[in-house]
Image (cartoon, coloured by chain):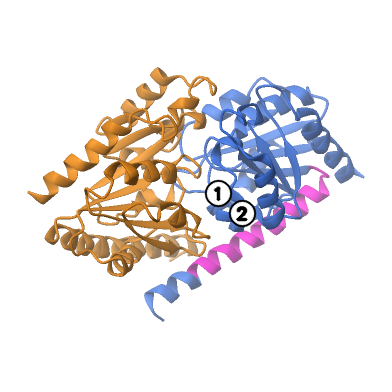
Chain colours: A blue, B orange
Amino acid sequence: MSEGRKVIAMQESVLAENQRAADLNREEFARRSVLVVNVVSSPGSGKTALLERTLEALNGQVSTGVIVGDLATDSDAKRLEGKGAKVVQITTDGYCHLDAAMIERGSQELGLTGLELLIIENVGNLVCPAAHDLGEDIRVGLLSVTEGEDKPLKYPVMFKTLQAAVVSKVDLASAAEFDLELALRNLHEVAPQARVMLTSAKSGEGMEEWVAYLRDSARRKKH
Amino acid sequence: MSEGRKVIAMQESVLAENQRAADLNREEFARRSVLVVNVVSSPGSGKTALLERTLEALNGQVSTGVIVGDLATDSDAKRLEGKGAKVVQITTDGYCHLDAAMIERGSQELGLTGLELLIIENVGNLVCPAAHDLGEDIRVGLLSVTEGEDKPLKYPVMFKTLQAAVVSKVDLASAAEFDLELALRNLHEVAPQARVMLTSAKSGEGMEEWVAYLRDSARRKKH
């Protein structure tokens, strides 16, 4: 085998190993009826800000845990603490995504007993997390209005895997001259399966719809 | 060897192969006295907008070629065409970064004869391109004001490798409540070696300094 083919074979074996771990996670999450949401986006799309407002809105009414992944620092976990949810930080030490084994360890550290909602804040990256199932029920992708309308077309692998797409920072839409109609058309072209929601963590716009979506999905998972 | 250790060994061998190709690129670029600039950032930080304004400002006075990397689409290359530079698009087909072998092929397609400046627009990603030397003289990282001040701390591997850091979209700074002082402190902490420039492709702020930096660097490479 050539070096290139060996690398591809090795990557396939790593992905297969991740898939086995993800399937085990999914079985465990189903057994415990906990809804698992994997939040992905570019760096700086506002994942942590969205989750801060989300935890405040859930206000302890839905028993929630959060696993936060970052290459370095625990600043996101610190921002999410004290809002009624258990929070675990995973530092990936250079890896560009969380994997299913990290989520298994993070879940154990968090403790799944009594949990209704587990939110995973993935590493900021529109490429690597796409190929790594974590055992989640819902993969949510954020697209902030400042990133441009073309991102679904340029990162189709990720957008095709989403159950929900959150257009974030809509308060900045006019300052950024964001063409919402074009963005929605691009989203629909690449990810027709995704439920699209418009939000601003700053102004609160769309937060009710987003939080209701989480709450309803968690309720459905329970029954 | 365990599966994990085999993967790490394989990744090291891929990186070593990339380094050999990058060293050959660097020799070739030196022989031809062409300055090579590798532009990296998150998706949507404004790399293409910066390069559109840059090519307009250079106005054909510096013989320039551009290699554009994307997972999918050739929309960035199309935006850069007709501005006095030769443009080649590389579609990485799922890969999260350009590698040195792609740049070798792209350079051949572009033709290096007579070129003074070769700009590489990397795939939008703050992780994977960090580990992949392309043979460039200058690695420039963009940090848009809408991404938040903490990004240098959260993606230190990338920021540590930069010769220059461009804070982009400064026209949106007040709308995004961007704390410039904090961002500069974080940049300086992680990347004290980097020349920092503030720019807006929209208002034109800082474009003169940035273009002069490119022009001066290209002149120095020639002599």
Q: Residues within 10 Å of mark 2 (few under 14, many from 20)?
A: many
Residue that appears at 60% across and 66% down: A16
Q: Quadrant of residue B81?
A: bottom left
Crowd rating for badge 1 (residues with CA inside 10 Å; few <14, some 14–19, many 20+): many
| Residue A32 is covered by the magenta coloring | yes
Q: In the rendered image of this protein, does residue B54 appear above or below residue B88?
A: above
Quadrant into which the N terminus of chain B falls: bottom left
Q: Residue at x 33, y 26 (%)?
A: B189
Are circles 2 and 1 on residues that touch, CB within 8 Å? yes
Residue A66 in percent (x, y) is at 67, 34
Question: Is B144 displayed left or right of A58 in the figure?
Answer: left
What secondary structure characterizes most of the magenta part?
Answer: helix
From the viewer's perspective, is A58 left or right of B71?
A: right
Write down the residue under mark 2.
A158
Q: Amino acid at mark 2?
A: Met
Q: Chain of mark 2?
A: A
The disc labelled 1 sits on which kind of residue?
Answer: Leu
Question: Among all residues in the image, which is located at the extreme bottom?
Answer: A1
Q: Which residue is mark 1?
A: A126
- The span picked out in magenta is A10-34
Report the chain holding disc 1.
A
Side of A157 where B219 appears, left or right: left
At horizontal 41% and vertical 73% (from top left) the residue drawn is A4
Residue A178 visible in this rendered orientation of the protein: yes
Q: Position of residue B36 (x, y in %)?
A: 24, 52
Rendered location of residue A143, percent (x, y): 62, 41
Q: Which of the pair B32/A110 is nearer the observer?
A: B32
Given residues B60 and A64, the one toward you in this image is B60
Q: Is residue B8 above or below residue A140?
A: below
Which residue sits furthest right? A223
Helix, strand or loop under label 2: helix
